[in-house]
Amino acid sequence: MKLYDYAYKILMGGNLDDKLLSSTTINWDINENWESARYQSPARSAQIAFSEDQIKFPSKGALKSDKEKGKALHFFANHELLAIEMMAQALLLFPELSLSQKKLLVSTIDEEQKHLTLYLERMKDFHTTFGDYPLNSFFWSFMDEIHSSDQFYAVISLTFEQANLDFAQYYKELFKDLGDIKTYEILEEVYQDEIKHVARGRIELLKSTNSPDDLWNHYCESLPGKLTPARAKGIRFDDIGREKAGLGRDFIESVKNYQNSFSITNRKQWKK
Ligand SMILES: [Fe+2]
Ligand SMILES: [Fe+2]
């Protein structure tokens, strides 16, 4: 299968099987080219369709119950699926990426598919099936504003994936404290992969800067619309993961100190 067809099937095939299509089906061809293509929304079958209904993420105390654990993993699984779809859209949108950039993006999709599968399997232990709860399209809504690969890496890798270091770190410890080692191990694997994904975004953005000192400014300039670095951090700030992803001390401090008043209220305000 051509790379274009692989990305198209992931994005516009509606079933979970399409979303989990293996990259081993790709016939890599250095001369493959296509016209940049943008889609309004990923195709999703009725079972996994986006919903406007909103549900709350389970509170810390509630996570003792299996039902609420299943619900939490359902949220995480949707984030993985959105990442897969956004990366597939980026492949279709930016045919000008080099072959090695495309290969790196595909191996990131491989890892997001692995995360999704791990969550779906663990959800079964909690009698939860993907689609049991409403699935939001929040992250996808930023695709509209992404017009360059630098913007893509700034939004996906250095904002959402960077914030996910904090969330994965927090929740893996929480599940460990709850004695749920299986879920802890999944989150640990996700966390380790996320460090690599943040590093990939850092390396991509560095290609457009003269020196690593310019990374912060270039990152900020590459964020589209209302998105700010406030969204690049989560529940508990993880310095170590960021260092492992190769982010410099100044960059890390800039994220940490950015708009410290950032709260759930702020989050709601810029939600579209
Ligand atoms: Fe992931
Ligand atoms: Fe990731």
Image (cartoon, rainbow, N blue to C red):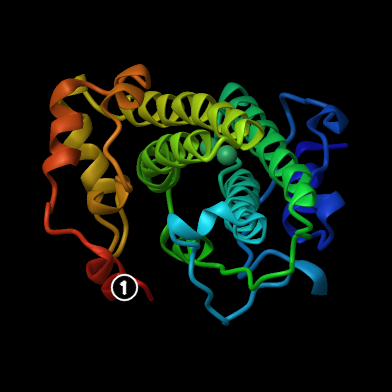
Q: Quarter of the image containing the N terminus? A: top right
Q: Tell me what residue is drawn at x 12 percent, y 54 percent.
A: 259
Q: Which residue is mark 1?
A: 268
Quadrant for residue 60, please give it. Answer: bottom left
Nearer the observer, 20 or 131: 131
Q: Is residue 48 left or right of residue 137?
A: right
Q: Quadrant of residue 149?
A: top left
Give the answer, above or below, for where 31 lies relative to 140: above
Where is 67 relative to 242, above or below? Answer: below
Q: Position of residue 104 (x, y in %)?
A: 59, 26
Where is residue 87 drawn, in percent x and y? 59, 45
How crowded pointer 1 is (Cα within 10 Å; few <14, some 14-19, many 20+) is rated as few
Q: Can see residue 45?
A: no
- Measured as percent of width and height from the top left, residue 136 is found at 57, 69
- Above or below, 74 against 148 in this view is below
Is residue 175 among the parts visible in the rendering? Answer: yes
Residue 69, position as x, y percentages in the image:
61, 53
